[in-house]
Image (spheres, rainbow, N blue to C red):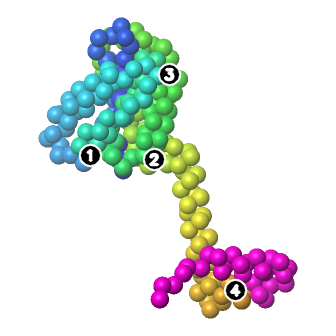
């Protein structure tokens, strides 16, 4: 999963063309001699998508194996170019964080912007690198991945126990912690969950 570019733009109804306020690119996967052309294309396509994203709207546009995600928050718009494997929810979570950070640092100064900003914004460059892992952008995804990992460890533990020659059925029978009703319940559940054999 990769992020090729992040842009922050002014996209208000009174501005005929979106104004790029900040940008960060990672063209490491492309030939160096194509970087200027790719940069122009990203600015053009990003501006086009941002200009067609209405205030308070989120949208995703697929182009080949890239997806351009755009989020317009009352005229301040964040655009991200990600590959098509990057989770959509994580992409919009990232764009939301970028807009929060931009407004925290620059406030409402973006409203008076008339032309493309030449000033570098280090946070955007850091975000481009940091959020290549979607779990960093989306805390729920990170928690889900940790739960999945715990589940795998849990299954490995049960399998490891059974691999040593012990059977769960015999452990249940020998257990003094389970009463007769619990043992019967286990046996019925085990019988119900067994697969049918075809003759």
Q: Secondary structure at mark 2?
A: helix
Q: Which residue is mark 1?
A: 65
The span picked out in magenta is: 172-199
Q: Which residue is mark 3?
A: 103
- Give the left or right position of residue 112, taking residue 153 as reference: left
Task: Give the spatial CA distance, label 2 vs label 4.
Answer: 42 Å
- Give the left or right position of residue 116, taking residue 157 as reference: left
Image x and y of residue 133, in percent: 44, 49
Residue reaching furthest front?
A: 199
Image x and y of residue 67, in percent: 32, 40
Question: Mark 2 or 1, which is nearer the eye?
Answer: 1
Image x and y of residue 9, in percent: 36, 22
Task: Look at the numbered discs 3 and 4 and tell me whether their residues touch, using CB distance below 8 Å.
Answer: no
Is residue 115 a member of the stretch shown in magenta?
Answer: no
Question: Mark 2 or 4, which is nearer the eye?
Answer: 4
Crowdedness of circle 3 by 10 Å Cα count: few (<14), some, many (20+)?
Answer: some
Crowdedness of circle 4 by 10 Å Cα count: few (<14), some, many (20+)?
Answer: few
Q: Residue visible at 57% across and 57% down? A: 146
Question: Mark 1 or 3, which is nearer the eye?
Answer: 1
Q: Secondary structure at mark 4?
A: helix
Task: Look at the numbered discs 2 and 1 and tell me whether their residues touch, using CB distance below 8 Å.
Answer: no
Q: Which residue is mark 2?
A: 134
Task: Give the spatial CA distance, label 3 vs label 4.
Answer: 61 Å
Is residue 185 a member of the stretch shown in magenta?
Answer: yes
Q: Earlier in the sequence, mark 1 or mark 3?
A: 1
Task: Give the spatial CA distance, label 2 vs label 3.
Answer: 22 Å
Q: Secondary structure at mark 1?
A: loop
């Amino acid at each position: 999963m990769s992020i090729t570019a992040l842009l922050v733009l002014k996209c208000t109804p009174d501005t005929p063309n979106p104004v790029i306020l900040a940008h960060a690119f990672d063209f490491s996967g492309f030939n160096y001699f194509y970087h200027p052309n790719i940069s122009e294309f990203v600015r053009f396509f990003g501006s086009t998508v941002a200009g067609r994203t209405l205030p308070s709207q989120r949208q995703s546009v697929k182009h080949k194996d890239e997806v351009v995600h755009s989020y317009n928050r009352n005229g301040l718009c964040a655009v991200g170019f990600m590959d098509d494997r990057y989770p959509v929810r994580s992409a919009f979570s990232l764009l939301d964080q970028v807009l929060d950070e931009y407004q925290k640092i620059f406030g409402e100064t973006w409203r008076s912007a008339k032309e493309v900003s030449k000033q570098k914004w280090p946070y955007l460059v850091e975000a481009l690198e940091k959020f290549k892992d979607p779990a960093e952008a989306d805390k729920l995804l990170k928690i889900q991945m940790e739960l999945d990992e715990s589940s795998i460890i849990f299954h490995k533990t049960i399998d490891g126990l059974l691999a040593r020659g012990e059977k769960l059925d015999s452990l249940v029978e020998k257990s003094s912690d389970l009463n007769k009703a619990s043992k019967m319940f286990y046996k019925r559940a085990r019988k119900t969950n067994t697969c049918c054999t075809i003759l």
